[in-house]
Image (cartoon, grey):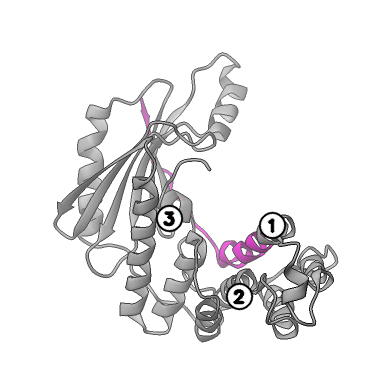
Amino acid sequence: MVVMTINTSFTNSVGRHASAVLALIAAAFMAIALDANADTEARDCTLRDVADWQLQLLDEREEVTPEYILTVTEAFLAACPYRPETAEAKKIAGMAAADMGDAERAILHFENASALYDDRAQFYYAAALLAAAQDAKAWNVRDSLINTWLNRLASNPDIAVEATDTRGGLIYKIKFLSPHPDTGIGVAWVAVPDGAGWPATLTIGSERQLTAIHRLRAGAEANTLQHVDYYRCRGRRLLARAEHDIPMSEMEEAARLTLIGYLSAPDADTETLSGEALPACLWPRRLLPRPAG
């Protein structure tokens, strides 16, 4: 097994463009999922107004910055407050405001969006609450997110979850009998602090993209590349990789000790300068892994 550590640094541009990527995904999804009867329920706005907003988000002539996303989305919300798409639009506006460093504006949009079902929006919401010094509410949002994630896992017969109570929080071990086709994650350990702090996650997987790159170098017949990744809110480290299965006996204790160490001083940094993107977690689906579908 080749052991290695890679620290990845991130500039604010990563966070600032996250809203743009999400906006494009959400726009494409909403175009497919629209109710055929929605026009009769949305007063003066029609699908044409929705399409115009989506086209603005996709306009290649514009630099799709958080400021631009927020401007066009708030204009859509003001013009079409009764459209069924407004819940998604408010989440997009909230994330764009957070990427601009405007916590209060982000909170307003998130709370007007009612239920926040996707992980990324909830991580953004918690970050905005922390920036606005609403710490207790922020960590309640985190707890709600964790509970929703655990309930989804519990309803899947191909997933086994074990919880261990330890000093500073809980460590969950998740075994995926049917790994996600892209990440290949078979086992994950997730640490959740008792008090303030973001979750941290250690996973064993065989990511399809990394294996493809490995086979370009080592040959098409090379074995699937196994790797161990350690995710924190704003950082990712590749701890190990191997061309054979990584023995679980080696990983159990290593994962436990790593995450116990994390729980002794979990990430809960809320420092940000005026106008900078709020420090929302970068990998929501890696911090809280789940199966495909």
Q: Which residues are magenta?
A: 1-23
Q: Between marks 2 and 3, how big is the CA–CA gap?
A: 28 Å
Q: Give the residue type at disc 2.
A: Lys
Residue annotated with mark 2: 90
Q: Between marks 3 and 1, how big is the CA–CA gap?
A: 34 Å
Image quadrant where residue 133 sits: bottom left
Q: Which mark is residue 33?
A: 1
Question: Which is nearer the eye, 84 or 49?
Answer: 84
Q: Give the residue type at disc 3.
A: Gly
* Lower sequence index among marks 3 and 1: 1
Q: Which mark is residue 235?
A: 3
Residue that appears at 23% across and 69% down:
195
* Lower sequence index among marks 2 and 3: 2
Callout 2 touching callout 3 (CB < 8 Å): no
Q: Is residue 188 above or below residue 102?
A: above
Quadrant of the image containing the N terminus: top left
